[in-house]
Amino acid sequence: MEKAAENVDAGAAAQLQLQLKLFGSWASSYTHRVQLAMRLKGLAFEYAEEDLGNKSDALLRHNPVYK
């Protein structure tokens, strides 16, 4: 039973890794911290560089505080 639970957790983790996308700016220390933490944990992610003067629709959709 425990083995089946481990397989489910591993499958869910693999799907999560495919969905991780980090929006950030090269000048942001927060972005660098998150990138470092994700790499240390072995998480695969896609990085999307953002122009903070002209925010993308995706950034605004996922970060509603800055609308």
Image: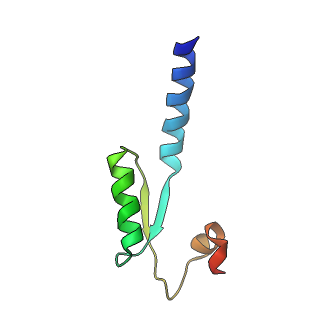
* Residue at image point 43% right, 57% down: 46
Q: Position of residue 32 (x, y in %)?
A: 35, 66
* Residue at image point 49% right, 83% down: 52
In the image, residue 67 sits, relative to residue 29, either above or below, namely below
Q: Tell me the quarter of the image containing the C terminus.
A: bottom right
* Residue at image point 62% right, 79% down: 66
In the image, residue 64 sits, relative to residue 39, either above or below, namely below
Q: Give the mark count.
A: 0
Residue lying at the far bottom of the rendered structure: 53
Q: Quadrant of residue 47?
A: bottom left
Residue lying at the far top of the rendered structure: 1
- Relative horizontal placement of residue 66, taking residue 30 as reference (left or right): right
Q: Position of residue 1 (x, y in %)?
A: 59, 10
* Residue at image point 53% right, 50% down: 19
Of 38 and 22, nearer the camera is 38
Of 47 and 42, nearer the camera is 42
Q: Position of residue 31 (x, y in %)?
A: 40, 68
- Relative horizontal placement of residue 26, taking residue 59 as reference (left or right): left
In the image, residue 42 sits, relative to residue 32, either above or below, namely above
Coloured how? rainbow
Q: Quadrant of residue 33?
A: bottom left
